[in-house]
Image (cartoon, rainbow, N blue to C red):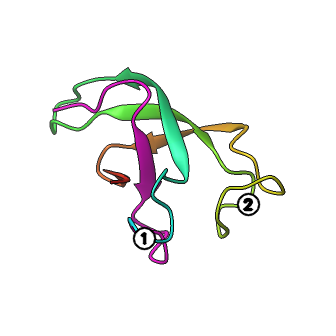
Amino acid sequence: MTQPVGTPVTHISQQWANSRTTPDGTARILEARGPYPDGSYEYRVAAARDFSRQPGPDNPMDRETWWSSLAARPAA
């Protein structure tokens, strides 16, 4: 099942990101495509500029990219 537009998410490769360190996520879903044959979706997200750091004033979520639903998890 797809996550709704506006959902804050983190990427599974961001092992440091959890509900305590990044309660508002490191990206926000802008669009969803799918489902694909394997049941996955593709999310266009607004993500932080620096993937390895927490979002904030010096690392705004203003970079658009695509993440697989298999790699995106809801933030909270």
Q: Which residue is mark 1?
A: 20
Q: Which mark is residue 50?
A: 2
Residue visible at 42% across and 48% down in the picture: 9
| Quarter of the picture holding the C terminus | bottom left
Query: What secondary structure prevails in the magenta region?
Result: loop
- Direction from residue 71 to residue 1 in the image, left or right: left
Between disc 2 and disc 1, whose residue precedes? 1
Residue at far right of view: 58
User: Within 10 angstroms of label 2, few (less than 14), some, or many (20 or more) residues?
Assistant: some
On whether residue 9 falls in the magenta region, the answer is: yes
- Direction from residue 39 to residue 6 in the image, left or right: right
Q: Secondary structure at mark 2?
A: loop
| Quarter of the picture holding the N terminus | top left
Amino acid type of the residue that numbered disc 1 sits on in the rendered structure: Arg
Q: Nearer the viewer, residue 11 or 42?
A: 11
Number of on-image labels: 2
Q: Which residues are magenta?
A: 1-18
Q: Nearer the viewer, residue 46 or 58?
A: 58
- Direction from residue 9 to residue 3 in the image, left or right: left
What percent of the width, then of the height, locates residue 71? 36, 55
Select label 2 or label 1 by which is in front: 1
Q: Residue 55, relative to residue 35: is it above or below?
A: below
Residue visible at 39% across and 35% down in the picture: 7
Amino acid type of the residue that numbered disc 2 sits on in the rendered structure: Asp
